[in-house]
């Protein structure tokens, strides 16, 4: 009980007046049927920063992340309550255009999931569906996004090769390129490097760091070293609750809450 009370103060740690906030949740709760998998979470995400969501398996990280671009709408029986404010709009309202929302708030999943198409077509597919057919423009977007995803040099002579012929790490960077081709504001990433070897992981981390000047990134990670290396802010999830939210260094070196301390020091349970 005491821990909860203390946690609430830190949830509101960031001062809205000092930082530009890209997105803010208020009392976001997620139910799967009767099961309240995410208890009221109020967090804010600073623009052009990386925020990590950490916590044990089943603590609600993916559940919360999916609510940020209405991905829980795809899960039968899932219900998201509370407010998710983005550019003055509560995108959790029923009448919000989900398709449009996901153009602004893109997502990269744990397992690289390129389409069974060429590298080029992976990036241009959604753009064409949105009516962009100018070959020159499409070429330019393919080049720019592959450069941003640190993949251009490796694939520039093979753009018509199947994406499935790329390595896992390259596929994941292609998925990042595909997500940023839609020019989102916010990129949600659910353990984007967990299926990758250390070198590919390091490449994906470098990619994320280089994307920071254009995108606000929210990433779920099990890897605490990774959270420490790349993120500005960290939120610690435990049993469906945000226990503590603060600057990453503070979470790792001076956590205020005992459960956080136990988790980040590896003495959990
Ligand atoms: N599609 C679903 N249907 C029903 N319950 C679900 C569903 N997805 C998740 N849950 C439940 O919600 C809780 C939180 O799960 P979630 O996947 O968000 O955890 P997580 O922190 O992402 O875990 P992990 O680190 O293992 O990915 C768990 O109890 C899980 O069983
Ligand atoms: Mg998860």
Image (tube, rainbow, N blue to C red):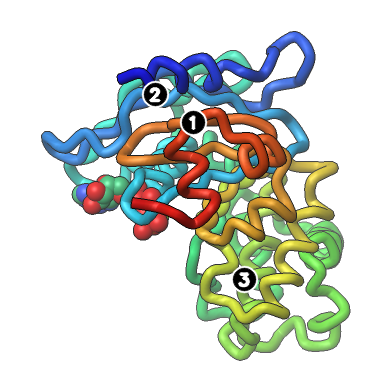
**Distance from the alpha carbon under mark 3 to that under mark 2:** 38 Å
Q: Name the residue beneath numbered marker 2.
A: 3
- Please identify the residue farthest to the top as the structure is shown: 17
Relative depth, front residue between 112 and 242: 242
Q: Quadrant of the N terminus?
A: top left
Q: Is 61 left, or right, of 11 in this rendering?
A: left
Q: Secondary structure at mark 3?
A: helix
The answer to the question of whether label 2 and label 1 lie on touching residues, with beta carbons closer than 8 A, is: yes
Residue name at image x 20 percent, y 46 percent: 76
Residue name at image x 69 percent, y 22 percent: 21
Q: Is 252 left, or right, of 39 in this rendering?
A: right
Res 257 label: 1
Residue 68 location (% of width, % of height) = 48, 36
Foreground: disc 3 or disc 1: 1
Q: Residues within 10 Å of mark 1 (few under 14, many from 20)?
A: some
- Please identify the residue farthest to the left as the structure is shown: 34
Task: Give whichever of discs 3 and 2 has the lower sequence position.
Answer: 2
Residue name at image x 75 percent, y 20 percent: 20
Relative depth, front residue between 89 and 211: 211
Residue 223 location (% of width, % of height) = 56, 61
Residue name at image x 53 percent, y 69 percent: 194
The answer to the question of whether label 3 and label 2 lie on touching residues, with beta carbons closer than 8 A, is: no
Asked whether residue 106 is in view, the answer is no
Q: Secondary structure at mark 1?
A: loop
Q: Secondary structure at mark 2?
A: helix
**Distance from the alpha carbon under mark 2 to that under mark 1:** 7 Å
Residue 127 location (% of width, % of height) = 65, 55
Res 172 label: 3
**Distance from the alpha carbon under mark 3 to that under mark 1:** 35 Å
């Amino acid at each position: 009980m005491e821990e909860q009370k203390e946690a609430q103060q830190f949830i509101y740690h960031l001062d809205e007046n000092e930082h530009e906030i890209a997105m803010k949740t208020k009392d976001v709760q997620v139910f799967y049927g009767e099961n309240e998998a995410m208890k009221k979470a109020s967090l804010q995400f600073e623009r052009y920063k990386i925020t990590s969501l950490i916590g044990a398996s089943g603590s609600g990280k993916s559940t919360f992340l999916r609510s940020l671009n209405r991905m829980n709408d795809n899960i039968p029986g899932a219900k998201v309550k509370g407010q998710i404010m983005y550019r003055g709009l509560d995108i959790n309202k029923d009448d919000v255009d989900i398709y449009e929302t996901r153009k602004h708030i893109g997502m990269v999943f744990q397992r690289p999931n390129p389409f069974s198409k060429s590298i080029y077509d992976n990036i241009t597919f959604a753009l064409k569906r949105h009516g962009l057919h100018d070959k020159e423009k499409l070429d330019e977007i393919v080049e720019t996004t592959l450069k941003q995803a640190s993949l251009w040099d490796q694939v520039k002579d093979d753009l018509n090769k199947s994406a499935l012929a790329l390595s896992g790490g390259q596929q994941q960077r292609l998925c990042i390129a595909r997500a940023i081709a839609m020019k989102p504001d916010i990129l949600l990433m659910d353990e984007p490097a967990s299926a990758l070897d250390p070198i590919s992981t390091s490449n994906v981390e470098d990619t994320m760091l280089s994307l920071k000047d254009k995108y606000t990134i929210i990433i779920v990670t099990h890897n605490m070293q990774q959270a420490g290396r790349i993120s500005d802010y960290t939120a610690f999830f435990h049993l469906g609750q945000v226990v503590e939210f603060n600057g990453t260094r503070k979470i790792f070196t001076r956590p205020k809450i005992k459960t956080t301390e136990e988790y980040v020091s590896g003495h959990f349970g």
